[in-house]
Image (cartoon, rainbow, N blue to C red):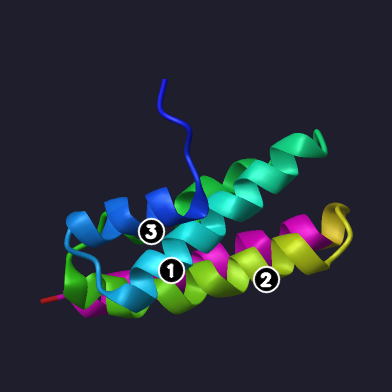
C-alpha cells in the first residue's frame, strides 16, 4: 500500500496534466478530506457534485469557483440545515452556469 502525502497527491495531479495551481488545490482538498476522516466527521453527501477536476478545461473554468465556494462553506459554517440549503442552492447555480456554457 502506498502511503499518500500532500506532495504525492500534488505530484500525481501534475502527472495527470493539471497545472501547479490546480495540483495544489487538489492536494489541499485531499488534506482536508484526510483531516475530516480523522475527526470522524462525515462529508456532506452533496459535496461530490461540486467536483470539477474531471471536466474539460472550458467547463472547469466555470465550475471551479463553485467547488471552491462549496468547500469554504462546508469547512467554515456549522453543520446544520441552513448550511445544507446554502450548498443545495449553490449547486443549482453551478449546474445552471455549466448548462449556460454548453447551451447551443
Q: Is residue 9 magenta?
A: no
Q: Nearer the viewer, mark 2 or mark 1?
A: 1
Label whose residue precedes the other's in the sequence (2 or 1): 1
The image quadrant that residue 104 belongs to is bottom left
Q: Nearer the viewer, mark 3 or mark 2?
A: 3
What is the number of callouts on the image? Answer: 3
Assess disc 2: are there few (<14), some (14-19) or many (≥20) residues with their C-alpha within 10 Å of its C-alpha.
few
- Which residue is painted at 72% across and 68% down in the image? 73
Read off the residue under disc 3: 10
In the rendered view, does 79 fall on the left or right side of 58? Answer: right
The image quadrant that residue 58 belongs to is bottom left
Viewer-nearest residue: 89 or 63? 63
Is there any visible trace of residue 42 in the rendered image?
no
Read off the residue under disc 1: 24
Q: Which mark is residue 102?
A: none
Q: Main secondary structure of the magenta part?
A: helix
C-beta proximity under 8 Å, tags 3 and 1: yes
Which SS class for mark 1? Answer: helix
Tell me if residue 96 comes above or below residue 43 in the rendering: below
Q: CA distance from mark 3 to mark 1?
A: 6 Å
In the rendered view, does 73 fall on the left or right side of 103? Answer: right
| Image quadrant in which the N terminus is located | top left
Which SS class for mark 2? Answer: helix
Label whose residue precedes the other's in the sequence (3 or 2): 3
Residue 2 pos. (x, y %): 41, 28
Is there any visible trace of residue 9 in the rendered image?
yes
Give the magenta part as a residue range: 83-103
In the rendered view, does 24 fall on the left or right side of 45? Answer: left
Which SS class for mark 3? Answer: helix
Q: Which mark is residue 72?
A: 2
- Which residue is painted at 37% across and 77% down in the image? 21
Amino acid at each position: 500500500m502506498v502511503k499518500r502525502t500532500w506532495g504525492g497527491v500534488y505530484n500525481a495531479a501534475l502527472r495527470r496534466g493539471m497545472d501547479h495551481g490546480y495540483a495544489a488545490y487538489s492536494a489541499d482538498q485531499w488534506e482536508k478530506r484526510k483531516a475530516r476522516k480523522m475527526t470522524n466527521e462525515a462529508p456532506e453527501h452533496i459535496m461530490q457534485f461540486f467536483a470539477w477536476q474531471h471536466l474539460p478545461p472550458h467547463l472547469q473554468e466555470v465550475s471551479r469557483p463553485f467547488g471552491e465556494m462549496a468547500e469554504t462553506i462546508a469547512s467554515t459554517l456549522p453543520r446544520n440545515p441552513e448550511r445544507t440549503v446554502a450548498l443545495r442552492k449553490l449547486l443549482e447555480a453551478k449546474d445552471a452556469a455549466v448548462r449556460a456554457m454548453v447551451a447551443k
